[in-house]
Amino acid sequence: MRARSERAGMRASAASASAAAAAVLALAAVAGVAGVAGAAPPRADRPVAGESIGGGKPARVDLVIAIDATGSMFDEVFVARATALAAVDAYARADPPIDLRVGVVTYRDKGDDPRVVPFELTSDLAAVRKFINAVDAKGGGDRRESVWFALQTAIRTLKWDLDKNTAKSLLVIGDAPSKTYKGEPDLVPLAAEAKAKRIVMSAIAISKADDTLAEFTRIAKLGGGSFATVEPPPPRTDVPRGKPPPGRDVVFVVDTTGSMSGSIAAVRTKVHALAKTMAAEGGGGDSALQEFGEVRFGLVDYRDRGDAWVAKMRTPLTSDMGRFLSEVDKLYADGGGDWPESVTKGLMVALDDKMGWGAGSGKAIVLVGDAEPHRYKGEPSYEDLARDAGARAIPINTVGCSGDSEVPPFKKIASLSGGEFYTLAKLGRAVDDSVGGK
């Protein structure tokens, strides 16, 4: 059964594999590899494979390929393999021949065991191909993955030939952006380490998602390499997916008092962009973040006592993106009067059982506002609400929209609930992290 499904998958991804090979050829010269059929002329500031180095010996090339092997790659795994194999073959068929070693790092995310699997640099290309062909997609759990940790493993752990005459290329293949963990380096210091070792980093995204494309482009830019995309294949029907992945519930709680007009427009713009990204990744389905069985959104808007309403549930959690967008589009700024607003009432409505939180789903709240909470008798404190949310594994990611972007209670709400605080300028990141499960 497995062999039959493998053949079906390879046939289904033949067009994408061809595109992958073309992408690899476009990247090869940037890494300093001449003589690769179809590649553009190499850059003059890099060692050139194919030239003799020291007494007529073949030029040396170290190629390391980092491959996303998380569950979101279920549909793309055949294309990822084909892309990696195309890279190996493009380098191996260089004319004149080169002294080639290839290594591989497969990566998933923190909590997966193993998180990364390194395959040491070797000239045994048959062993390399066997390893690549065995790459399977599983794990991950949320959208963002350990891309930076994979780069760290590739740069620091594998035994690169540090001779300055050896061309060194690190190619990342994946469909999702990275997650940054405390105590671990992000892209900027890793790119500096790669540059110090004369390692050129390039990236191929098997995705149409804007954040993935932006991040993989940044890898190539900081790594001195090139960026390419490969068309994601249609969903696989040849093998069962097994146990459905967990869902994701995200509730937006938005201050709609008079001072929030510009911020509401920013929320509307970001949510519509998110909808487009999800549709691109999921082929138009409602649950388009591929590692989640179902992504649902809810919306609460709050003002203050004396206004037309204090806090209103615009929509409970729903997977109907059209309904959610319609309610977001109805938000408008009005009322308020004084500075503090009914933040606590907004959170009370969001945390109420009527919101419909899923028992087994990953959860988050995005709180967007520009004023501190009013403290009213008979209502719980915002500190207690934040602690309650944290105890229920519902982190509250807060977005401060005041002029100086400093709303101290918002920082405290985030901290007590296990969330993060963001400025309005980073609204997009707050939403992406909430939906992606950071």
Image (cartoon, rainbow, N blue to C red):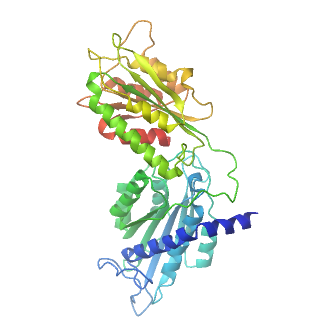
Q: Quadrant of residue 189?
A: bottom left
Q: Quadrant of residue 161?
A: bottom left
Residue drawn at (50%, 67%) of the image: 65
Please say whether residue 158 is visible from this viewpoint: no
* Residue 80 rendering spot, x and y as whole percentages: 55, 65
Residue drawn at (46%, 59%) of the image: 151
Q: Quadrant of residue 37?
A: bottom left
Please say whether residue 111 is visible from this viewpoint: yes
* Nearer the observer, 260 or 392: 260
* Residue 346 rendering spot, x and y as whole percentages: 42, 20
Q: Is residue 56 above or below residue 6?
A: below
Q: How many marks?
A: 0
- Most distant residue in the bottom direction: 56
* Nearer the observer, 272 or 98: 272
Residue drawn at (58%, 78%) of the image: 125
* Residue 256 rendering spot, x and y as whole percentages: 34, 24
Q: Where does the N terminus fall, quadrant-wise? A: bottom right
